[in-house]
Image (cartoon, helix red, strand yellow):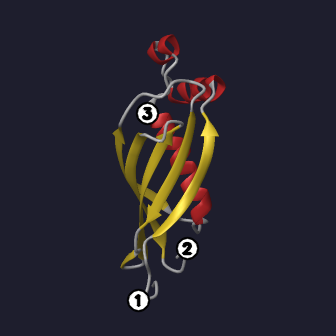
Amino acid sequence: MTSPDFQDSRIHLGQWRVTEEAVLRYLAAVGDDAGDYRQHRLTPPLALTAMALATLLEKLELPGGAIHSLQEVETCRGLAWGETVTGTATLQRPRQRGGLKFITASYVLTGGDGAAVQQGKTTVLAPSGGAE
């Protein structure tokens, strides 16, 4: 359990440049061969989601047995290859149910212009006794 004085905490996810190589690797991994993203040199929205989620989960240092249970995504605008993205997440107070801790974080990804590219919310279930 967290302490009663827990306040929502911000987590800096970092900044990265979305490369053609990273997008092509993502498209191959998900089996997308339609060509639309390649033709327009755009980043698939769920590729950004995967990048943000991977970074967030790494920073949370969750125990073994954690399960990604929920993902909400809102795409605000397209992102061209080569653009820079900065991510920030806000961790909400964990909730306890049975032997699981529900850890929810909202995130925002902004482009180089400072405008939101994507925002969303993710929830992970972790065995009790894990990350605070």
Residue tagged by mark 2? 131
**Label 2: element kind:** loop
- Indicate which disc, 3 or 1, sits on the residue closer to the N terminus: 1
Q: Looking at the picture, which amino acid does disc 1 mark?
A: Pro
Label 3 – label 1 distance at C-alpha: 37 Å
Label 3 – label 2 distance at C-alpha: 28 Å
Q: Nearest the camera: 67 or 74?
A: 74
Q: Can you say which quadrant of the picture contains the N terminus?
A: bottom left
Label 1 – label 2 distance at C-alpha: 16 Å
Q: Looking at the picture, which amino acid does disc 3 mark?
A: Pro
Residue tagged by mark 3? 45
Q: For mark 2, does the 10 Å Cα neighbourhood hold few (<14), some (14 to 19), or many (20 or more) residues?
A: some
In the figure, residue 18 lies in which quadrant?
top right
**Label 1: element kind:** loop
Residue tagged by mark 1? 4
Residue placed furthest toward the front: 113
Q: Residue at x 45, y 62 (%)?
A: 90
Residue placed furthest toward the right: 21
Q: Looking at the picture, which amino acid does disc 2 mark?
A: Ala
Q: Position of residue 123 (x, y in %)?
A: 40, 60
Q: For mark 3, does the 10 Å Cα neighbourhood hold few (<14), some (14 to 19), or many (20 or more) residues?
A: some
